[in-house]
Image (spheres, rainbow, N blue to C red):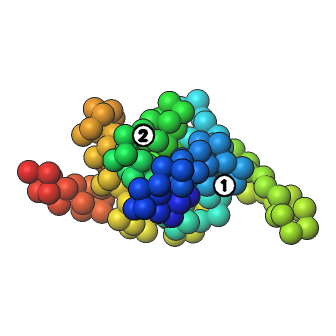
């Protein structure tokens, strides 16, 4: 998805770009927003698909979706806000858990594709929890600085990583 969007932009090919955007919105695989973020919780958070696997894949997925959303934003398309800010809800979920707080978790099931077996994750994974990943500043900038929305868990994550001070210096 990221490559398709980037190639479409670089080559000035709207048809290629649109393939990536359409996949983000309605694709059948895990990269589309509804599959990457399969559960909305009543507390306003949304569960990221990889959360039961480990936090390294979870955070890197968040970072990659942010990259796709940022490329689209610069083309005039708002994927950050797609589906009522679904991505913000997922980023807040991941940040909150990696800040050391508890989050809700719904059992996630998927088919392997190879033999049709159903796999299941029944709890959020603590593997690689609280590992620092340089993914939060762009997300924070969009939702808080551009849109004026609240992202307290992302702000707290940036503070723990020491990026809040650096980000404020960059934004001067």
Residue under the point 41% across and 56% down: 12
Q: Residue at x 30, y 63 (%)?
A: 161
* Residue 104 falls left or right of residue 130: right
Looking at the image, residue 17 lies above or below residue 53: above
Classify the position of the N terminus by image quarter: bottom right
Secondary structure of the residue carrying tag 1 is loop
How far is disc 1 from disc 2 in space, using C-alphas?
Answer: 21 Å
**In the displayed structure image, the side of residue 62 where residue 135 appears, left or right:** left
Which one is nearer the viewer's eye here, 93 or 25?
Answer: 25
Name, please, the residue furthest toward the left.
172
Residue 55: x and y in percent read 54, 63
Neighbor class of circle 2 (other Cα within 10 Å; few <14, some 14-19, many 20+) is some
**Lower position in the chain sequence, tag 1 or tag 2:** 1
Q: Nearer the viewer, residue 56 or 18?
A: 18
Task: Locate residue 54, reporting x and y percent.
Answer: 59, 65
Q: Nearer the viewer, residue 32 or 45?
A: 32
The residue that appears at 14% across and 51% down in the rendered structure is 171
Q: On the picture, is 63 further left or further right than 113?
A: left
Q: Is residue 46 visible?
A: yes
Q: Which residue is mark 2?
A: 77
Residue occupied by mark 1 = 30
Which is in the foreground here, disc 1 or disc 2? 2
- Does residue 62 appear in the picture of this structure? no
The local secondary structure at tag 2 comes to loop
- In the image, residue 56 sits, relative to residue 65, either above or below, namely below
Indicate the position of residue 86 as horizontal and vertical percent values: 52, 38
């Amino acid at each position: 998805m990221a490559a398709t969007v980037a190639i479409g932009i670089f080559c000035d090919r709207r048809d290629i770009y649109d393939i990536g955007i359409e996949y983000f919105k309605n694709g059948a695989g895990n990269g589309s927003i509804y599959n990457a973020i399969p559960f909305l919780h009543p507390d306003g958070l949304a569960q990221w698909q990889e959360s039961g696997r480990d936090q390294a894949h979870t955070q890197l997925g968040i970072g990659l979706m942010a990259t796709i959303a940022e490329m689209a934003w610069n083309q005039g398309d708002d994927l950050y806000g797609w589906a009522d800010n679904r991505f913000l809800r997922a980023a807040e979920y991941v940040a909150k858990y990696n800040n050391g707080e508890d989050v809700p978790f719904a059992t996630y099931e998927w088919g392997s594709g190879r033999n049709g077996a159903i796999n299941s994750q029944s709890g959020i994974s603590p593997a690689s929890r609280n590992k620092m990943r340089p993914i939060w500043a762009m997300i924070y900038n969009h939702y808080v600085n551009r849109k004026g929305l609240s992202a307290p868990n992302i702000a707290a994550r940036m503070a723990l990583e020491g990026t809040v001070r650096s980000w404020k210096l960059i934004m001067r």
